[in-house]
Image (cartoon, helix red, strand yellow):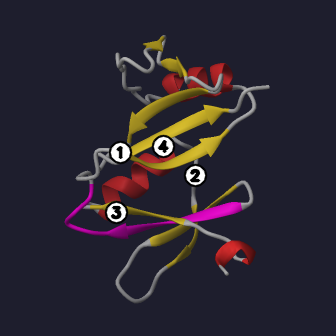
Amino acid sequence: MLSDYDMSATIPASDLARAKAFYSEKLGLEPTREVEFGGGYFYSTGSSEFLLYPSGFAGTNQATAASWRVNDIDGVVSGLKAGGVVFEEYDFEEFKTVDSIAKTPDGSRGAWFKDSEGNILSVFQEQA
């Protein structure tokens, strides 16, 4: 039933102004429209969009909240680092990051970082 519809992420922010600045300054994203009721901002990225909205529960999810599929993970990670993004380093049994990038069991590669609100975001490149 839902397979015919687009889906978008919703990302909570405890400090909406701080989060808006992070997404602009660190990720190079600008809002495409503002939400009048309740506040928040929609952002377009690729062919999808996400909502950044005010919430006291921001940063409480300990799993990845949203991901970007990229074609050159090394270049994207390098560019984001140059812009001040700090990547998480993981050492799990399933995978370990090396220079901020982990190879997953299926051969894909991923890197994770937190936004200004503590939400975990990622970039990943599928196996070629």
Label 2, on which residue?
A: 29
Which sits earlier in the primary sequence, circle 3 or circle 2? 3
Q: Nearer the viewer, residue 9 or 36?
A: 9
Residue 26 visible in the shown view = no
* Residue 56 x/y as whole percent: 19, 66
Q: Nearer the viewer, mark 3 or mark 4?
A: 3
Q: Is residue 46 left or right of residue 108?
A: right
Q: Amino acid at mark 4?
A: Glu
The local secondary structure at tag 3 comes to strand
Gap in angstroms between the C-alphas marked 4 and 1: 24 Å
Establish if 110 lies above or below 114: above
Q: Amino acid at mark 3?
A: Pro
Label 1, on which residue?
A: 63
- Residue stretch rendered in magenta on the structure: 48-58
Which sits earlier in the primary sequence, circle 1 or circle 2? 2
Which sits earlier in the primary sequence, circle 1 or circle 3? 3
Which sits earlier in the primary sequence, circle 3 or circle 4? 3
Q: Mark 1 near mark 3, Cβ–Cβ under 8 Å?
A: no
Gap in angstroms between the C-alphas marked 1 and 2: 22 Å
- Residue at 48% x, 70% y is 41
Q: Amino acid at mark 2?
A: Leu
Marking on residue 12: 3
The local secondary structure at tag 2 comes to loop
Label 4, on which residue?
A: 25
